[in-house]
Image: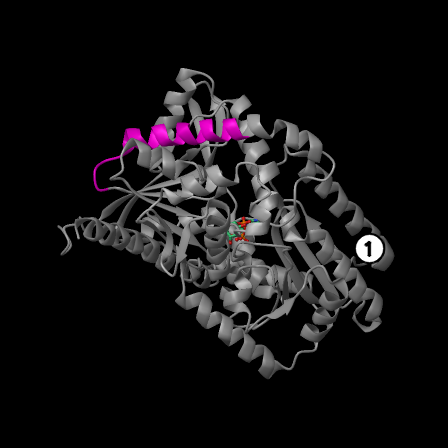
Amino acid sequence: SETEDGRPLKQRLLVVANRLPVSAVRKGEDTWSLEISAGGLVSALLVLPGVKEFEAKWIGWAGVNVPDEIGQKALSKALAEKRCIPVFLDEEIVHQYYNGYCNNILWPLFHYLGLPQEDRLATTRSFQSQFDAYKRANKMFADVVIKHYEEGDVVWCHDYHLMFLPKCLKEHDASIKVGWFLHTPFPSSEIHRTLPSRSDLLRSVLAADLVGFHTYDYARHFVSACTRILGLEGTPEGVEDQGKLTRVAAFPIGIDSGRFIRALEVPQVQEHIRVLKERFAGRKVMLGVDRLDMIKGIPQKILAFEKFLEENAKWHDKVVLLQIAVPTRTDVPEYQKLTSQVHEIVGRINGRFGTLTAVPIHHLDRSLDFHALCALYAITDIALVTSLRDGMNLVSYEFVACQASKKGVLILSEFAGAAQSLGAGALLVNPWNITEVAQSIAYALDMPPDEREKRHQHNYEHVTRHTAQDWAETFVSELNDTVVEAQLRTRA
Ligand code: ADQ
């Protein structure tokens, strides 16, 4: 039951991410219900049990504060059935590490949005205590990993929440195979160098054996940050520090496209499709599906749609924009402000362009179940993905996977990682330029069928060939190879 180089056929994989793929809701002193959480990282990692080479376990926070031992024991037991292992974080640390350092500092900075405008000074003052909490939280993740680690396991750390984890693990045991993958962009080194903790973060990530990003640009920015800020040497392979190489490379993520394509055959989905088609008969459907987050450019998208309506009277009453925005990080004031801003713009535009029988924008603040989402993707004529920055953006992939019969148009931000893979099939736009987005909408609505077909085919081939399963397999096998090569180098 071993491969040629002595690895077990099924490799144990410890997948560590801030959040587990399920959220826990407490029902009683020792009873819990578990729900799948929404978001790109979860969508990507849910494919792992289907990859036959791995025996994967998740380690992460379940999204709730569980102060009592009875609750912790019961939750650990319920999660174990889903191959999940919880990290328990108390309210104070969640506030400082998750809401503070991760969501208020790293997230906006990595997406080129700077620090939150109004409380910039407050953020500067609380910076050190939040960074200390970040390090503490990362050590708590490390403790759980170390407790469950068995020799030969691969530890795959995910995202900006856990940049300190590779270092904690390697300091404990240098022989642990550690990979780290970033789901967001890595910004230009000029942005990264404004972070007070810039060097600590880079050094701890470099403790990993393999560091991965969605695109070559992000990998290049990371290597530049290491050369310019730490004075290390960048090579085509990665970053070298006193003879020790950390491999840095691009691993563009994908989706489980088969799951979407198969879902379209399910009777329940077909029924959804029938109802939606009837509901929007005679109108072209434009769709936005996003977590409600400032990086997704939702207000900009809606303003561009308004501009389009202003300039294209012939389309009034003949198009509808469905914007589905699942609220996230509802504790963070910036996100609460965004929600009311979006509601206000939608209300104004519907008041301006609506009629007694129809409104131009349907905005839903909620998560849709998988079948409803597939049906929506399938009946859409134009998908609008206008992220201001986005690591990759899986919604664009999911839309393409569901469009085999309709061959609709994807309008895609040039600042989403997906622009590198779907750029030839999509209409690329600068989301800040609402005139350009409005013109692209008009162009997409009148696009000749043969052009639509050609563009769709290009994207469909990409989405069905580069799946999330391939992404995970490639990353882990590259990590195994990197470790073997490093061992050979030290022996030589
Ligand atoms: P996200 O920022 O969450 O992911 P994205 O890649 O688009 O962005 O994934 C969102 C996922 O959540 C999709 O699978 C989508 O179907 C689902 N979703 C969104 N809104 C929903 C709704 N209203 N109802 C139901 N489901 C909804 C982060 C990065 C991305 C990167 C991924 C994966 O920000 O850039 O592509 O991780 O690496």
Q: Where is residue 397 in the image (x, y as percent from the top left)?
A: 51, 62
Name the secondary structure under disc 1.
helix
In this view, the residue in front, 312 or 142, is: 142
Percent position of residue 325, x then y:
64, 48
Residue found 38% across the figure and 61% down from its top: 236
- Answer above or below: position of 397 versus 11: below
Q: Residue at x 19, y 53 (%)?
A: 488
Left or right of 328, for residue 159: left
For mark 1, does the 10 Å Cα neighbourhood hold few (<14), some (14 to 19), or many (20 or more) residues? some
Work out whether 280 lies above or below 61: below
Q: Look at the magenta stretch and give its main secondary structure.
A: helix
Kindly tell me whether mark 1's CB lies below 8 Å from ligand 1.
no
Q: Which residues make up the magenta segment? A: 131-152
- Image coordinates for residue 16, horizontal then vertical, percent: 39, 39
Q: In which quarter of the image is residue 464?
A: bottom left
* Front residue (pair 439, 33): 439
Question: Which residue is painted at 50% across and 67% down in the image?
Answer: 421
Image coordinates of residue 447 in percent, x first then y, are: 66, 78
- 429 left or right, relative to 476: right
Can the viewer see residue 367 in this picture? no
- Is 230 part of what is drawn in magenta? no
Magenta run includes residue 138? yes
Q: Which three-letter amino acid code belongs to the residue tagged 1?
A: Ile
In the displayed structure, does residue 354 sit left or right of residue 72?
Answer: right
Q: Mark 1 points at which residue?
A: 349
Camera-side residue of 347 and 100? 100
